[in-house]
Amino acid sequence: MTNPILSETASDLTTGFTPHPSAAAQRYADAGLFPQQPLWRVLDQAADRTPGAPAVTDASTDGPRTLTYASLREAAIRRAAGFTAAGLAPGERVIVQLNNSAEFAITLFALLRAGVAPVMTLPAHRRTEIVHLAQSSGAVAYITEDGRRGFDYRDLAGELRTTVDTIRTVFIDGDPGPFTSLPESDPGAVTLPDAAETEPDSPALFLISGGTTGLPKLIARTHNDYAYNARRCAEISALTDTDTYLVALPAAHNFPLSCPGILGTMIAGGHVVLTDNPSPDNAFDLIERHRVTVTALVPALAQVWCAATEWEPADVSSLRLLQVGGAKLAEPDAIALDAALGNVVQQVFGMAEGLICLTRLDDPRELVHAVQGAPISEFDEIRVVDDQGGDVADGDEGELLVRGPYTIRGYYRAPDHNLRSFTDDGFYRSGDKVRRLPSGHLAVTGRIKDTVVRAGENVAADDVEENLLAHRSIRQAAVIGLPDDALGERICAVVVLSHEHPRTQALDLSSVRSFLTERGLASFKLPDALTVVPSLPLTAVGKIDKNALKATLATH
Ligand code: OOB
């Protein structure tokens, strides 16, 4: 099957890539924001500075394996030579789908060294997403692993090869079956690209859009913008070579990859520990064993960690920064985390498309609990607009639009989406509803399109959710609209009970409605149905997946 979007020049990396307009690019470059080097140099420079320092520890296997910066660089160069000898050429795209491991780091840097652009898919992606991403990127190879962890990616590889005809090679970490093992070659036997051959404003890698509607889109991040993203996050989080960062979320996601994540930790010369098991019993042990200082979680996992501090015996006092982002961290949860772990929370509001907001280390704790952060760059241009596109006053709610040095000007090879997702003057329409404080901090209040249209009234899901979360018995809440003959849509509240709720008692709709009424919620916003579930479905990175919920509940 060939992709009709792709033209004859589809093999070219920059076909379908939207760079910054030249005036903006010049302004960013003149300000010295960008390193003007291939992203590969992040590892190369750390290996020059501190060759013997630990770079990555793979805690995903039974016997942990540590690579120093020098040995990681050497392994990456040998693998880059292997990929080149196997026929991968500079500018080509490959799909990478690996679990958190040292192989992930070696492979990522190997591809960057070989000038090949990885498409950073997540382990939870399946056939629909992988086929779509391979087609839209024109990928020539698929790099994944065997069936060690309950899912056999070699089956997916077989389907991919028969469906997408650009895929020439499949490389497997582990038992390759009918495919090829991850390669290694003598770098003397091949020609790897020179730093000077890399255009630093061209795509270094592709992230996947996190949206839960439709198929994911490709986000091209350049050598310059991605290094800048990682460096600013590392500076704001005050990372140094004494820090150890635990990768507990899927490593290919922007948050643990570059905010500051793996790349930011390496820019600072620190140590990266990777695990694919973020459960508190495993993660707390790793924090104790490796004296982990920084890690990043989504709110659902952070809640689990917070509860586990009550019974897990491991000493986690080395942790100085617990970054939480990807979805809204409720204020009571932020307060509880700070209390349980000692004022370690940093809120992170970010997107693969670019903009990253962080709370600052010296922000008052009350502010850290209440807002999702402030932009990391003085060059980030933020607008908060009403539905006519006019700017709202500070403190008022509106849609967040953003433009800046590390925010894309267009999705890769998606002209139709770009017409909708970007303004004429190049602002990205995030779809997020925010309030901006005079200090520049942003509080995220919801998604602009996340509404239930009930009997002609528009009800914002987040409004009802926030009020539900104030109920002692409710730990998590998702409000969705379900088709209804009489109302158009009916409001369905799906909740997870808190530990404070008496086990023997049901939570009933009428008592929840009375509770919400007492809080002052308008009667047309009250849920028509209440469903109690043991847990909510999550996306590939661990955000509440409302589409999955709607699909399950609509069939009931
Ligand atoms: C991160 O990136 P994506 O691309 O998976 O998702 C971006 C979207 C945002 O537009 C927003 O809707 C939501 O996820 N989001 C948050 C949030 N952080 C992200 N909503 C509320 N509060 C937050 N703190 O999710 C991502 C990328 C880099 C760093 C952190 C998260």
Image (spheres, rainbow, N blue to C red):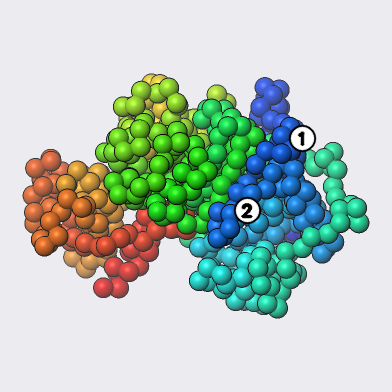
Give the crowd class for mark 1: few <14, some 14-19, many >=20 residues within 10 Å: few
- Which quadrant: the N terminus? bottom right
Q: Identify which residue is drawn at 8% across, 56% down.
A: 510
- 320 relative position to 166: left or right: left
Q: How many marks?
A: 2
The image quadrant that residue 318 belongs to is top left
Residue farthest to the right?
189
Question: Is there CB contact under 8 Å for labels 1 and 2?
Answer: no
Any part of residue 211 in sight: no
> At label 1, which amino acid type do we have?
Asp
Q: Position of residue 299 (x, y in %)?
A: 37, 46
- Cβ at disc 2 under 8 Å from ligand 1: no
Disc 2 is placed on an element classified as strand
Q: Nearer the viewer, residue 117 or 513?
A: 117
Any part of residue 547 in sight: yes
Q: Position of residue 197 (x, y in %)?
A: 84, 42
Q: Position of residue 482 (x, y in %)?
A: 27, 63
Q: Identify which residue is drawn at 32% across, 69% down.
A: 552
Q: Position of residue 38 (x, y in %)?
A: 75, 40
> At label 2, which amino acid type do we have?
Arg
Q: Identify which residue is drawn at 57% across, 28% down.
A: 235
441 up-or-down from 486: above or below: above
439 up-or-down from 532: above or below: above
- 217 relative position to 114: left or right: left
- 551 relative position to 93: left or right: left
Q: Nearer the viewer, residue 222 or 282?
A: 282
Disc 1 is placed on an element classified as helix
- 523 relative position to 83: left or right: left
256 up-or-down from 396: above or below: below
In the picture of the structure, the residue carrying the numbered disc 2 is 65
In the picture of the structure, the residue carrying the numbered disc 1 is 48
Distance, label 1 to label 2, CA atoms, is 21 Å
